[in-house]
Image (cartoon, rainbow, N blue to C red):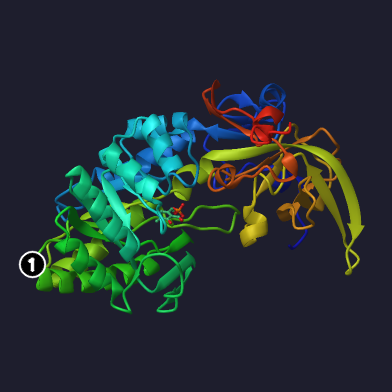
Amino acid sequence: MTAPIDALVVNDISQHIWPLGAKRNSDGALEISGADVRDLGKKYLTPLFVLDETDLLSRVRKYLKSFASQTHGNKLTKPTQIFYASKAFTATRFIELIVKEGMGIDVASEGELRVALAGGCKPENIVFHGNNKSLEELEFALDKGVGIFAVDSFFEIARLAQYSKKRNVKAKVLVRVTAGIEAHTHDFVATAHEDQKFGFSLAAGDADEAVRIVIKEENLHFLGLHSHIGSQIFDNKGFEIAATRLAELSLRIVKEHNVQIEMLNLGGGMGIAYVESDAPLAIEKMASELVDIVHKLFTSNGLAMPQLAFEPGRAIVGPAMITLYTVGTTKNIQLENGDKRTYVAVDGGMSDNIRTALYGAQYSVALASRLSNAQPMLSRIVGKHCESGDIIVKDCYLPSDLVPGDLLAVAATGAYNRSMSSQYNLVTRPGVISVNNNKITEILRKETYQDVFATDPGL
Ligand SMILES: Cc1ncc(COP(=O)(O)O)c(C=O)c1O
């Protein structure tokens, strides 16, 4: 990290990273959609996830407007479907908000499916994912009338066909294809990513074979193809390569079986800004480019344009949520180059944000309970867990007058933070509240020790 940096920058709540409703109020404290974080911290206790509902809804609407409600100059005959990838974050009241706007839901387990249904998502608007769906999960989903099964293995196709037959239904199936590409941010690796657990390999001919089997099965309806190439993607290059490969496969399918590819689901992975230098493509631009890409690929091959579908998770909820922490202790260390760095320990850590330890993720942080003009100090935000890798923000600047009791806010923690949280060291997992113009809704209450000990018969 390069110095120098001034106090003004340290206090900045940049709209590029923070939710729409985040700003400093007249006291200098951070406010989320009209609610002062000092009040939220007192009432709901930290660590606390705070969702800016206005930000969330604006993102949901932008996605629906850019994709679902456009024909893109009549290139699309059916509205594009958006399935929110609920692995990013899910809770009943949260799903209610999204479903009301018109989004479908992507689930990857029976638990996520139960929440999607409880949140009011119609079963026909659900895509069920997973490389190892259990027999019970498949039966449960069929009984609930789940709309689309993204099949991931030959075993699953056989099981789904058998259970559908037993129920005398015809399950709609997308064949998940490993397109041989892995994309992260603006990097992508084509051809190199066959070696992973998801989907049917194109290179090995498994995808062609899976489609053949699905088409033959009386109780399965072949809907189309699915591919998910990665995460935190900033441009369309990776999607273009995947779409090209799926279009080639589609041509083979149409020729061999004389069926239509009704749906082409290109998955999720749209990136967001965690730090100032992150520059994801605007969603409007991403949408129109993607439609153009698929339209060109399909029509130039004489194929009918399929209905498009996408599964954004991070891009919907990531930027809309922040985590609020209370500073507990600090410690100064001298680096080898003579510089100083301050370890700032907060009341959460890798139990509510595993992404830094897992992927080296970067985050932006701000002193949230007040404004400070003190000299910025190089800091590392760490948690309270018994791991030296328990780091939330590796390098950042915070005011040097930071004291225990100050509140810190970490931006863009909506996706894969609470949903990947743990009770490591037997901590209680944080609550999630949503704020809309100072109206507060509890989305998930903070756990109690009773919750944590619920499965220990000795306690
Ligand atoms: C099949 C599938 N769809 C969608 C997503 C959502 O990805 P993101 O949250 O990066 O948009 C994932 C993430 O792992 C996925 O595996």
455 on left or right of 289? right
Q: Is 167 in front, or is 127?
A: 167
The residue carrying pointer 1 sits among few (fewer than 14), some (14 to 19) or many (20 or more) residues within 10 Å by Cα, namely: few
Left or right for 393, reference 220? right
Q: Is residue 86 left or right of residue 79?
A: right
Give the residue at the far left of this rendering: 258
- Residue under the image location 51 percent in, 58 percent down: 279
Q: Is residue 386 above or below residue 401?
A: below
Residue type, label 1: Asn
In this view of the protein, which residue sits in the foreground, 305 or 36?
305
The percent position of residue 247, horizontal first and vertical second, equals 22, 70
Which element carries disc 1, helix, strand or loop? loop
Q: Residue 241: x, y in percent?
A: 33, 72
Judging by the rendered image, the residue that carries numbered circle 1 is 258
Nearest the eye: 60 or 100? 100
Q: How many marks?
A: 1
Query: Ligand 1 sits in which quadrant?
Result: bottom left
